Structure formats: structure tokens, C-alpha cells
Image (cartoon, rainbow, N blue to C red):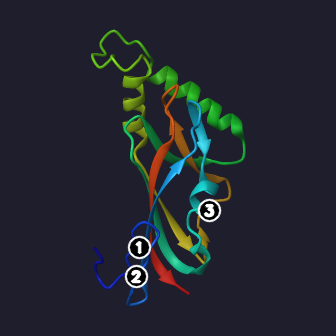
Amino acid sequence: MAMFGTTLLISGHMKTYNNMDIYQKEIRLPSFPRGFHLITSHITKAIPDLGSYSAGILKVFIKHTSAGLTINENADPTVRDDFESHFNRMVPENAPYYRHTYEGSDDMPAHLKASILGSSVEIPVTDGRLNLGTWQGIYLCEHRNRGGNRSVVITLIGEKA
């Protein structure tokens, strides 16, 4: 539903109202192993018209409860390794007080980690590109040993040049 004279795009379709566009698309990410993974390129490739936006906001939302999203260092992969090590220490498997255990020892910690990190990120769009810092990228935070493909909804609200 379009609001305030905007454009609405559902499943890769777009409508324009008063120079404001809304593009929305759900994509399936490839399966990643447990850990923190850069997915910025997966997101930008899913927005073929990104370059035509002069200003806007991109929201990326993951439709899962055992994986999360965050923005952090995109240059040194050891940062992602350290994230995984820290979160595993901070939220261990097999804690004796966990009651939700029937989906595996990694499941309850995955829910907790996903809640700590969150299910969405927002990024400004400026002059046709994501306005991230020099060393920033979008992470998929996969907390399950075998999480499988993850679905994310990409919503871009902005003004075209």
C-alpha cells in the first residue's frame, strides 16, 4: 500500500507517486555456513535500478528467527571470525537452563544471538549507491550449523534523479 504520495513495488514491480518510489523485493540468499558473512553485493544486485535513485533509504529485513543482520567491517575477514568467536562465548550452546532444545544444541543460542543483533538494517542511498562508510558492509549473521537458504526483504524508498 502506497502512503504519502510514494511509489510501491511489490515482487519486483514499481509504481511512482509524486517522484517518490518504493521498490520491494524478496530474495533468497545462498546457504552459508555458521558465521558472519558479507552480503552487500547480493543486496545491491537485487536492486537493478539502484543507480537511478538520487536519495533514499534501504531497509533489509531477514525473515528468520535464528539468523540476523548487522553492518560492520568489510575489509578484514578476521573481524567476522572474531564476531563468531565472541558470540559463541557470550551465548554458549548446551546451557543447562535452556528449555527449547528439541531442534538441536545450536538452535536456542541462535535465537538469542539473532535477537541481540536484530532482524533488519537501514542504509542511506545517495547518488545511486549505498551510502556506507569506507569499511562497512552488510553481514548475514548465520547462527545455525545448517541454516539453509535465508530469505530477506529489500525495501528501497527514495527519489529518482
Q: Are marks 1 and 2 in contact (CB under 8 Å)?
A: yes
The residue under label 2 is 15
Distance from Cα at disc 1 to Cα at disc 3: 16 Å
Say whether disc 1 or disc 2 marks the residue closer to the N-terminus. Answer: 1
10 Å crowding of disc 2: few (<14), some (14-19), many (20+): some
Report the front residue among 28 and 99.
28
Report the front residue among 10 and 113.
10
Residue at the far top: name it.
Answer: 96
Q: On screen, 161 above or below 47?
A: below
Say whether disc 1 or disc 3 marks the residue closer to the N-terminus. Answer: 1
Q: Is residue 56 left or right of residue 7?
A: right
Judged from the image, the secondary structure of the residue bearing numbered disc 3 is helix
10 Å crowding of disc 3: few (<14), some (14-19), many (20+): few
Q: On screen, 14 above or below 84?
A: below
Name the disc covering residue 45, or none. 3
Residue at image point 37% right, 31% down: 111
Name the disc covering residue 9, or none. 1
Distance from Cα at disc 1 to Cα at disc 2: 6 Å
Quadrant position of residue 155: bottom left
Looking at numbered disc 3 in the image, what kind of residue is underneath it?
Lys
Percent x, y of residue 120: 42, 51
Quadrant position of residue 77: top right
Percent x, y of residue 55: 52, 78
Judged from the image, the secondary structure of the residue bearing numbered disc 2 is loop
Total numbered badges shown on the rendered structure: 3
Looking at numbered disc 1 in the image, what kind of residue is underneath it?
Leu
